[in-house]
Structures are given as C-alpha cells and as structure tokens.
Amino acid sequence: MNKSNQHVAIIGAGIAGATLANKLLSAGYEVSIYEKSRGTGGRMASCRLEDNSADLGAPFLCPASDIFRQWLTQQPNVNEWTPSTYRFNGKHCKNQTHFIATPKQSSLTRELIQGANLYTSIRVGYLWPERNQAPYEEEQSRVLLRDEHGKALGHYDAAIVTVPAKQAAPLLEAVPRFVRQVEAATPTISWVLVIQISSVVPITAELIQGSHPLLLRCIKDSAKPKRVREENSDTWLIEATPKWSALNSDSDPKHVAEQLRSAFFAVLNRDFNTQPIITAERVHRWLYSRHTTAHLDQRLNVGYLWDANTKIGACGDWLELGDIEGAWFSANKLAEQVILQRELI
Ligand SMILES: Cc1cc2nc3c(=O)[nH]c(=O)nc-3n(C[C@H](O)[C@H](O)[C@H](O)COP(=O)(O)OP(=O)(O)OC[C@H]3O[C@@H](n4cnc5c(N)ncnc54)[C@H](O)[C@@H]3O)c2cc1C
C-alpha cells in the first residue's frame, strides 16, 4: 500500500525520534521533525570546545541485546571502541568493547533522519487533535502543532512525542490515559564537565571508572576512533555520579566545574602522577540524563504510547529500559504499530 500521502510530525531528534523517522521514511511516510536545540542527538549530543568537538551526553553505546548490537554493526558511521580502562584507584581493569558514532555521537541521528524535513531551534508547545470535515469530504482527524509562542506549525496525520517524560507531559494532555505512564518515569540528574587540555597527558587510561564519591567516570573523548582533534591536545568528559549530581542540582555551574575538575586532577595526580593544563572547558547539567522505569505498570506498558483515535503517540527511553537501547526499542515498536495500523485501514 502506498502511504506516501501520510505526513507524520515527530517532536525531538534524539535516538528515539531519529530511529522512528528512519523506519517511517523507509515505509513511505513523509516525516517532519521539530527539535528545540540547534542540532540533533538529544542526550547523545556533541558540543564544540574551541577547535575540537566533544560528546556532551552519552559517551558510547553498550548493547545488551544481540538485535541492537547487530543493528549497530550495520550502521555506516558506527565504530567499535575498546578503551584502555582503569579504576579510580589506579588499577587496570578488563577492557570492554563499546560502540561509538563517528566523527561524533550526534552523527548517528543525523544519518538516520536523511530524507526527513528537520526544523531546528523550534520548541513545540502545543499538540491537539482536530477533526476537519470539508463539505462532501470524509471526516479526517489531524493533529495541530504550535510552537511555544502559539505560532501554528501545521496539521499532521499523526504526531509523535519523543522527548523526556517531564517535557512530554504537557504535549500529551490530549490523551489523559497517557498521564499515568508519564508520571511513572523518574529522571536522573547528571552534571558533566568537558575539558580540553593543552598537552597530551602521558597516561594510557582512556576510561576511568569505579567507586568514587563524586565521579561516575572520566572518558578520554579524543581517544575515540575518527575524532577530529587539534594536535597536542586531549579532550575528556568527566561525569558526576547521579547521587552527587542530585545533591548539587541547584549549585552554581562554576562551583560544579571546580569540584569536578579538582576531583579529576586528584585522580590523575595521585594515581597517574600527572597534572594537565586546561585550555577550554564546558559544564552542563542534564536534568533528565536517564530514566528509571521500574515503576511502570508492566501489564500496561508495551514500550510506547499510541492512541489510534487522535493519532498521537510517544516513544523514548522513559517507556523502555531508560537508556539508549530502550529508546531504540521503543521507537522500533511504535513505528511497527503505526505502520500496521495504516495497513489495516
Ligand atoms: C551524560 C549522559 C550519559 C549517559 N550515558 C549513557 C550510557 O552510557 N548508556 C546508555 O544507554 N545511555 C546513557 N545515557 C542516556 C541516553 O543518552 C538516553 O537514554 C537516550 O539518549 C535518550 O534518547 P531519546 O531519544 O529517548 O531522548 P533525547 O535524546 O532526550 O531526545 C529528545 C529530544 O527532544 C528535544 N525536545 C525536548 N522537548 C522538545 C520540545 N518541546 N520541542 C521540540 N524538541 C524538544 C530535545 O532537545 C532532544 O533532542 C546518558 C545520558 C547522559 C545525559
């Protein structure tokens, strides 16, 4: 069946939105994506740091299932990375292979949405079903989108929200039964600091993790394959633990940067006997870095939300597993549901 006359709006260009777009495009739908940021990636975003670019969100992908692993190996811009791994006490531990998108994490979403209309720097503020009935024409249900200032963005055959649970709540008000699922998702806060250091630090560690009162892990971003970087400089991502991040959620970013920097330097100095010089840094607070989905009612939860009457749906990490793999599964399941329903009409 030709579905090319169906136009779906997707709100959010993270891994869930991009995966969904990719599936719907392959099935012949027209897809328009609205993204509030300047680029794609969401919590897999990358940022600029002077002349380098660095991953600001999820630093890598660690597939738990064979199906996700297999899908990752089929993506043209995804590579394996086996960082030399140490504990915070300086001891070497077993290296594990991860997957990363190249040349930066956000490249994966960019690639997946090829063929969709992408509207960036637009925050969708309103989404509501409307029934149009032109004289002598069949009644149609279409979804109206408006931006945060009330400006109409258009009518679509379906609209799918792929943003974090808290941000999804106001956009899903048209379907009251969705509220329970939205409220069941608990977000985690993460403070991160990205630093660029002038000289290459003479240590072999590329990932430092383990038990630490403040640090969750430190990742040498510039060691990832196919990263474009200035010579004689390294880039590190320092991620605070969820507990410390929650306790410091309202702290001054300058103070947070200072704390993370000195904790990282203490590790380098004590365990690796080195003291680098910072040339650029950026601190960022992720209010919804991951989601705990344990409270979801498993009898009701199918991994996505879809209302066949209004043609409004939602997918994302908060509806399945709370991480990248969950977001990917959620988007795949919803895409199948949307495509199946169209075929049944
Ligand atoms: C620091 C950090 C480390 C992490 N580490 C890991 C890890 O090691 N492994 C792992 O599996 N996961 C990790 N995660 C979690 C993982 O990144 C997320 O679970 C996953 O990326 C979520 O994808 P998503 O598409 O569901 O949502 P998102 O990536 O959040 O995408 C939603 C998009 O919607 C946009 N948006 C929001 N509101 C609106 C609106 N009103 N209008 C338009 N656009 C809007 C946002 O800007 C965003 O781009 C990490 C996250 C962070 C922040």
Image (cartoon, rainbow, N blue to C red):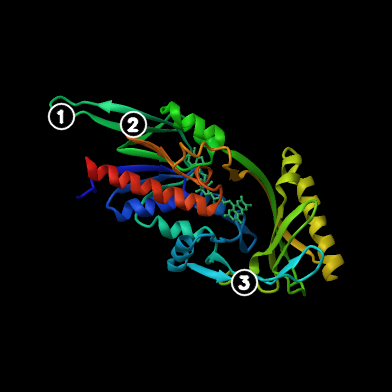
Residue 119: image location, x then y, percent: 42, 46
Q: Residue furthest left?
A: 136
Vertical placement of residue 136 versus 80, above or below: above
Rendered image quadrant of residue 208: bottom right
Vertical placement of residue 328 versus 77, above or below: above
Q: Is label 2 within 8 A of ligand 1 (CB to nearest ligand atom)?
A: no
Question: Mark 1 against mark 3, which lies toward the viewer?
Answer: 3
Left or right side of 204 for 332: left
Name the residue located 38 percent from the left edge and 51 percent from the top edge.
21
Viewer-nearest residue: 248 or 328: 328
Disc 1 target residue: 137
Rendered image quadrant of residue 286: top right
Rendered image quadrant of residue 233: bottom right
Disc 3 target residue: 82
Q: Residues within 10 Å of mark 3 (few under 14, many from 20)?
A: some
- Looking at the rendered image, the quarter that the C terminus falls into is top left
Residue 262: image location, x then y, percent: 82, 56
- Amino acid type for the residue under numbered disc 3: Thr
- Amino acid type for the residue under numbered disc 2: Thr
Q: Residue furthest front?
A: 299
Left or right side of 82 for 252: right
Disc 2 target residue: 310
Left or right side of 105 for 200: right
Question: Mark 2 against mark 1, which lies toward the viewer?
Answer: 2
